[in-house]
């Protein structure tokens, strides 16, 4: 699988005391939608700022696209919106995007393509200042996509929007992902990450609590991580078990999600009877979803 971004043992300490990012490591692979999920102040924006070269790291490493390019050139293949969208208020949507094309040396034909994608083509001649916040955000997404980046980075993309605006942005993110653009978004909203993302990194006070699939985070009966010599056979056999809802192979491990309880010993003997010897077995018992709600105290804003 093609690696877009690798983060290794990243740390950011502001001043002397605030350990905003604490030994963070994760990887982003092409074609997935990643959420960095954590309550306010958990280090999401700092992490995005570091990999976008607008915040200096304290220690650790990150590398874009396997590290073949220097960060400056790599970032030309990254589209990012980390602040409130800002365009010229008295210029139209189209004029604003044409200006971006001119500055970045992108053909003007991209303007119509991206305005269509974000659903603003009919409003192309309206001045930016007449746009709702949701429309401004969609224009910012169009702008970030003008040069067809490999990855789109969004920091709290639905903050401040009304319910309709929130839905439009979430639907748009899904469309962009379906077209093959990798996405990394930061959000403090569990349901946003559940609805939009395939993968998640959960942060609390800069420390990573979980990384993996969103499925793994929300599985109520827990789930297993398994490895054996013959992964295909392992998957075929385990899919026959009545407690198993769904399985997927990810990074060489088989993830087994359950719809009813199944303990490790039972699973192991079931597989042993089929002649399968496991080289790795971990059961995660608690739903990370519940843990996340507890750690954020059901914070909703
Ligand atoms: P999030 O985006 O998850 O809300 P941030 O990355 O913005 O979190 O902040 C993480 C921690 O770092 C917080 O404690 C915040 O107060 C602190 N912090 C963020 N930016 C700065 C800064 N420029 N100077 C000092 N502390 C900061
Ligand atoms: Mg933030």
Image (cartoon, helix red, strand yellow):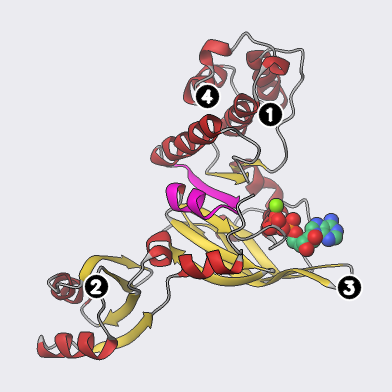
Q: Secondary structure at mark 3?
A: loop
Say if mark 4 contacts mark 1, CB within 8 Å: no
Write down the residue under mark 1: 104
Q: Give the x, y percent position of residue 100.
A: 69, 24
The reply to whether the magenta stretch includes residue 96 is no
Judge the density around disc 4: few (<14), some (14-19), many (≥20) Cα neighbours within 10 Å: many
Q: Which mark is residue 145?
A: none
Question: CB at mark 3 closer than 8 A to ligand 1?
Answer: no
Whole-number angstrom distance, CA of label 1 to CA of label 2? 54 Å
Say if mark 1 contacts mark 2, CB within 8 Å: no
Whole-number angstrom distance, CA of label 2 to CA of label 4? 45 Å
Seen in the picture, residue 191 relative to 102 is either above or below; the reply is: below
Whether residue 32 is visible: no
Q: Give the x, y percent position of residue 13.
A: 81, 69
Q: Residue furthest top?
A: 125
Judge the density around disc 1: few (<14), some (14-19), many (≥20) Cα neighbours within 10 Å: few
Identify which residue is drawn at 69% across, 21% down.
102
The reply to whether the magenta stretch includes residue 194 is yes
């Amino acid at each position: 699988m093609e690696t877009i971004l690798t983060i290794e043992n990243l740390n950011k300490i502001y001043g002397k005391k605030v350990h905003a990012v604490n030994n963070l490591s994760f990887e982003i692979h092409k074609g997935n939608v990643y959420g960095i999920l954590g309550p306010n102040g958990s280090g999401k924006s700092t992490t995005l700022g570091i990999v976008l070269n607008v915040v200096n790291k304290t220690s650790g490493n990150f590398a874009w696209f396997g590290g073949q390019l220097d960060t400056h050139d790599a970032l030309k293949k990254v589209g990012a919106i980390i602040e409130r969208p800002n365009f010229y208020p008295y210029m139209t949507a189209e004029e604003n995007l044409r200006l971006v094309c001119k500055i970045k040396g992108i053909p003007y034909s991209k303007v119509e393509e991206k305005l269509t994608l974000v659903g603003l083509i009919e409003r192309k001649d309206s001045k930016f200042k007449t746009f709702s916040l949701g429309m401004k955000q969609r224009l910012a997404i169009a702008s970030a996509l003008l040069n067809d980046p490999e990855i789109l980075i969004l920091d709290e993309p639905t903050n401040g929007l009304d319910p309709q605006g929130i839905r439009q942005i979430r639907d748009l993110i899904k469309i962009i992902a379906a077209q093959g653009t990798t996405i990394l978004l930061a959000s403090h909203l569990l349901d946003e990450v559940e609805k939009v993302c395939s993968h998640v990194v959960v942060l609390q006070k800069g420390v990573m609590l979980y990384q993996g699939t969103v499925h793994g985070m929300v599985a109520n009966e827990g789930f297993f991580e398994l490895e054996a010599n013959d992964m295909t056979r392992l998957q075929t056999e385990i899919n026959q078990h009545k407690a198993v809802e769904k399985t997927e192979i990810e990074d060489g491990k088989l993830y087994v999600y359950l719809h009813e309880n199944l303990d490790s010993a039972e699973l192991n003997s079931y597989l042993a009877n089929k002649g399968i010897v496991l080289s790795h077995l971990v059961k995660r018992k608690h739903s990370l979803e519940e843990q996340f709600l507890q750690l954020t105290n059901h914070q909703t804003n």
